[in-house]
Image: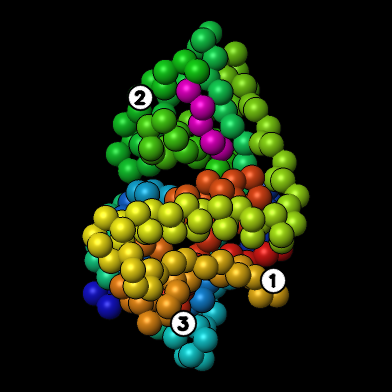
Amino acid sequence: MRGALGPALLAAGLSAAAAGVGAPADVLIVQRPSALVLFDTYQQRLDSARAASLPPFVPIVLLRLHDVMGDGFTPCAAVAIDGAPFYLQEESSGAFATSAPCGYTAVFRGVTMREDTVILLSGGALRLRSPSSGESSVVAPGTRALRVFETKRETYVRVPSAGMFGWVVLSPGGRPAAWRIQPAAPRAEVSADDVLRRVRGVTESANRTLRRLYDALGAGKGTIPSFRAVRSGREISCAVVPSSLTGEFTGSLLAMLPALERALGGTGLHPEIGGGAIHILLP
């Protein structure tokens, strides 16, 4: 490892709070989260492409600290990013391991988790403050911002249209006529069969693209690789067939993640890559 987050950000002493809506939690914010040593649900190290897809200043909820990986000795913390589970490697000192400089870092303790939308109304102005520099800018009327968590004074939000995170003041004394809260829609109750149907919709689209590509290259007479989604117990997995081509199609599996996220929208389920396949844990 090239380093670790400094003594001020030692994991020691942080509570392993639940991350449900309205619950208290401890949240880590890092300017360059790709510099953290992160592992997916299956304790596979995130490759550079997957790590680089994590946006700057994305909130990392600290769920369980001073745990160990499946090897029985590598220290780690169980965390959640956008509701998906990950493991963050710790140093022997308790600091979070890094592979490069992280830039701005901060831990916010005992915050209240939120999951709804702020809508800026035309009658006022809402200012978005940068997590690191403190500079602020006026958000355009009609902009939607997703509330992530709040402290006693400010609310940390994600502004999808700007692709960024920042702080806003939503207290009753802060010109409440300038905004309103739109409660989050309840997550859809879906069956395992419905989830599998959604996933297969994505894999079938990818397979059609593969067939067209192989036909265009004149290679369509042999065995054409395909993506196959299957259910086993409480998990749906998606892998390339034949399995001997798994290594060559890792990039294709990564490219499928956004489409799968869209297909699973509203379910609370998230696809993860591990062991040469995409995995979706069912509730």
Going 51% across and 31% down the picture, which residue do you hit?
145
- Whole-percent x, y for residue 60 in the image: 48, 57
Mark closer to the observer (3, 1): 1
- Whole-percent x, y for residue 2 in the image: 24, 74
- Circle 1 packing at 10 Å, graded few (<14), some (14-19), many (20+), is few
Which residue is denoted by mark 1 in the rendering? 234
**Element under label 2?**
strand
**Element under label 3?**
strand
Numbered circle sitting on residue 75: 3
- Of the two numbered discs 3 and 1 on the same chain, state the one appearing first in sequence: 3
Numbered circle sitting on residue 137: 2
* Magenta span of residues: 143-147
Q: In which quarter of the image is residue 222?
A: bottom left
- Whole-percent x, y for residue 81 in the image: 50, 57
Give the CA separation, mark 3 to mark 1: 28 Å
Numbered circle sitting on residue 111: none
Which three-letter amino acid code belongs to the residue tagged 3?
Pro
- Whole-percent x, y for residue 118 in the image: 57, 28
Give the CA separation, mark 1 to mark 2: 46 Å
Front position in the image: 21 or 151? 21
Q: Can residue 62 be seen in this view?
A: no
Q: Main SS of the magenta segment?
A: strand
Front position in the image: 106 or 43? 43
- Circle 2 packing at 10 Å, graded few (<14), some (14-19), many (20+), is few
Q: Can residue 194 be found in the magenta stretch?
A: no
